[in-house]
Image (tube, grey):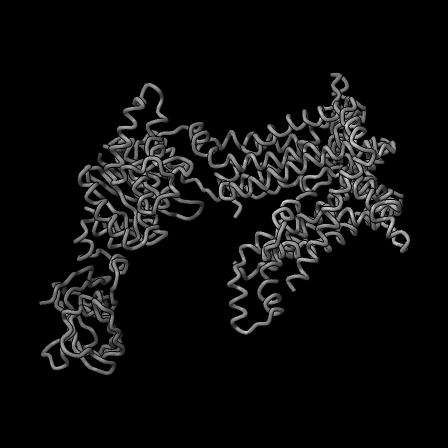
Amino acid sequence: MPGFGLAMGVTLAWLGLIVLIPLAALLAKSLGNGPAFWWQTLATPRVAAALELSFFSALAAAAVDMVFGLIIAWVLVRYRFPGRRIVDALIDLPFALPTAVAGITLTALYAGNGWLGRYLEPLGIQIAFTRVGVFVALVFVALPFIVRTVQPVLQDLDKEYEEAAASLGATRWQCFWRVLWPALLPALLTGFTLALARAVGEYGSVIFIAGNLPMVSEIAPLLIAVKLEQYDYVGAAAIGTAMLLISFVLLLGLNLLQRWLRRGRM
Amino acid sequence: MQVGIQSLSKSFGSTRVLSGIELEVKEGEFCALLGPSGSGKTTLLRIIAGLEFADHGKVLFDGVDVANREARDRQVGFVFQHYALFRHMTVHDNVAFGLQIRSRAKRPARAEIDRRVGELLELVQLAGFEGRFPDQLSGGQRQRVALARALAIEPRVLLLDEPFGALDARVRREMRSWLRDLQRKLNLTSILVTHDQDEALELADRVAVMEQGQVLQYDVPQQVYDRPATPAVYDFLGGANRLAVRVSQGRVLLGNEVVAVLAAADDAAAQLHVRSHDIQLLPADAAAGLQAQVLRATWGGASTHYDLRLAEGSTVEVDQPRWAQSGQLLAAGDTVRLRLERFGVFGPVAGSHHGITG
Amino acid sequence: MRRLLIGIALGFFALFLLLPLVVVFAEALTKGIAPYFTAIVEPDAIAALKLSLAIVAIVVPINALCGLCAAWAIAKFRFPGRSLLLALIDLPFAVSPVIAGLVYVLLLGSRGVLGPLLQEWDIQIIFAVPGMVLATLFVTFPFVARELIPLMEQQGNDEEHAARLLGANGLQIFRRVTLPNIKWALMYGALLCGARALGEFGAVSVVSGHIRGQTNTLPLQVEILYNEYQFQAAFAVASMLALFALITLAVKALLERRYARELGHH
């Protein structure tokens, strides 16, 4: 087959120029003064709080989406109801809607005088400009990743599977736990991984609703932007590498879990 | 055209897939490469086509080494197992492709291309299908389009890679005899890869039996079938029982019984191969034959299958054709005598011998 | 059970996806039709729209072409390091958009690795349009390749081999055999790439000079208006982006339904 050299050359040049060399610049900048200095930059309370908020709210949002995403995927695949096609198409809205638009819209919804906020505030529930706001924005952003990874697997899972289990005397609950759940788990985990990766780095939809109070509701990507505005390149680079490092460890762990689940299955 | 393969070897990484292949296909001859999967037959075919390249050795087209020539310059017709029709083109455009892509100087005029396509579709009995798309055709029709497409460039040799593998049994039989007639008519040198022994024996002028990257035997079908060169060929050509025997002063001994007499005088252990349908069942009171007891009888339409135990302990399978069954079927526990009609004996010292009793 | 699940799914859908969509348009029209159009045709908004479309027009062809090369090399050939290359192409999806902007600032900014060199030649990339193009290239990098690789792997090489044996050269194989087989998937990938390029906020925000009428894209314009408390105008511009998003989703759904097989989605 011809064209390997040309295609490979273009690919490597493209990958190198757009992705790898800039990422290398990040590593060079953040580790240029030695790991001790890097750690010192990170170990301030403000940075630690921002990283903690980013990762924990992303984990929480991905977990919540895992539950509701599974239900939505199930309903879309198994049931027929009016408007199903439109619901199906709109699931990808968070992909397609620019994050800044999502950000100001969620704020308009949940601010104290907002569409929903005005009913929640009297109940003592505050969402906008708190950590809960960060979580809500991430739930919005990460939802399609779960639905879209689980949906095709559910579609391929023949109804015969469940029928076979039922004919062997399994209850509905047993059908779900012993037949469907093991088949869905790998896809759910993949979706969770993708959702997490997206939510950790999310910026646009969060910064409007979060209020960005240092130590309270300031996410790590925002702190990078703040440091850049202050021309603290080394600080920004340090947070950037820390985020990449933590993400890498998390994704690697999820990957290993995935492999462990697949063992014994071809 | 004449195709020659000389001392050809190929490895993928550390796995040797072909070693020291020698093969000669004469002008107009139909050659079948027969072997189990992993025997290297498809790799050999792809090397002849120029889709893979050998590590060593020569591929000769009419005596000219083409081993370093690109696939597009070899002018070979290739028919793929899964058709590889261009799914977005009509039948007409598929067949015309090889002509349409030629440089302007060598490309026939449009009317000429249309005429040629019409002729070829006529040849493969698909006239009138020009406007259809591949997914509107049955498997057999698709394969015939693929053949017409391969023939359009007037190939010097036709290479067929398991062409009927994806078809159902009935269509496969029809295609087989049709292809044989077509190949004779065109007098086109052809090489077929298959793992189906019936297909190879029925279609080919000569059959190369391959295993583990080597050609075990290359001969006309009757020779390959009647006088397999090695135990592996015997095994692959189907239905063979293997029995441990001794050859002593020209006599083949199974336990203490003389099975056959050969012209060899060695005294050594050997293997006797006999196909299940080359054994005749005789009544228990017959004058000669090996004594055996029926373990199980399975009626199967055209023939009945028996599992038997010989007096000396080993088991043998026999297929008895319907015409040879007289009266009641044998049942488990009955005793019979066996006569080996055709067999082969292979031994380290004895070499290979083929016998016909009687 | 069925009703309960449909209820939960639709409830979650309405709350998290449908309601925000309604809010965008409702907020944009709070003051009526006339102010809405005034906000949209305002010169800064028009300039932002032009810049956004220009970035899309540069980014999509580049990433489509390079994605095509990468897919050709990865799907049609086996070579050592193939799975590493595949992982590297996916990398930008796992990186925060803010980091995507950050790496270019660190590489090409005035205090970046190549900063002095660029200054000497009087080339400005960061806080100017070229930087915004680069950052957008980074975040939309994988879309086309990701769409094409599984499809091309599934289609195999037989058709290309057949064409070669019939005498076709590399270009003829590509144009007459490969391209027709992947054209819809290419469009699909380009659509997703374009939608993301149009709406990208975080990466572009970091490298943009935030100069009105010059280095503002539509999402950045939304942010500026919002931060100046011009809520109605911000939502008016946002509603334009939401409309683009809805069109994207509609075209995407159409492609998925009409060309499911050509796209390799089952």
User: Looking at this view, is C120 or C8 the one in front?
Assistant: C8
Q: Hey, which quadrant is residue C175 in on the image?
A: top left
Is residue A54 visible in the rendered structure shown here? yes
- Give the percent coordinates (x, y) of residue B14: 44, 47
Compared to residue A182, the image places residue B5 above or below, namely above
User: Looking at this view, is B302 or C14 the one in front?
Assistant: C14
Q: Hey, which quadrant is residue B315 in on the image?
A: bottom left
Compared to residue A69, the image places residue B154 above or below, namely above
Residue occupying the far top of the picture: C121
- Give the percent coordinates (x, y) of residue C75: 50, 40
Horizontal relation, residue B278 to residue B82: left or right? left
User: Looking at this view, is B230 or A210 the one in front?
Assistant: A210
- Give the percent coordinates (x, y) of residue B303: 21, 68
Compared to residue A192, the image places residue A240 above or below, namely above
Compared to residue B4, the image places residue A256 above or below, namely below
Q: Residue at x 81, y 45 (%)?
A: A109
Q: How many marks?
A: 0
On-image quarter of the N terminus of chain C: bottom right
Horizontal relation, residue B341 to residue B214: left or right? left
Horizontal relation, residue A222 to residue B184: left or right? right
Q: Residue at x 77, y 28 (%)?
A: C37
Is residue A20 visible in the rendered structure shown here? no
- Give the percent coordinates (x, y) of residue B100: 35, 26
User: Looking at this view, is A173 or B293 the one in front?
Assistant: A173
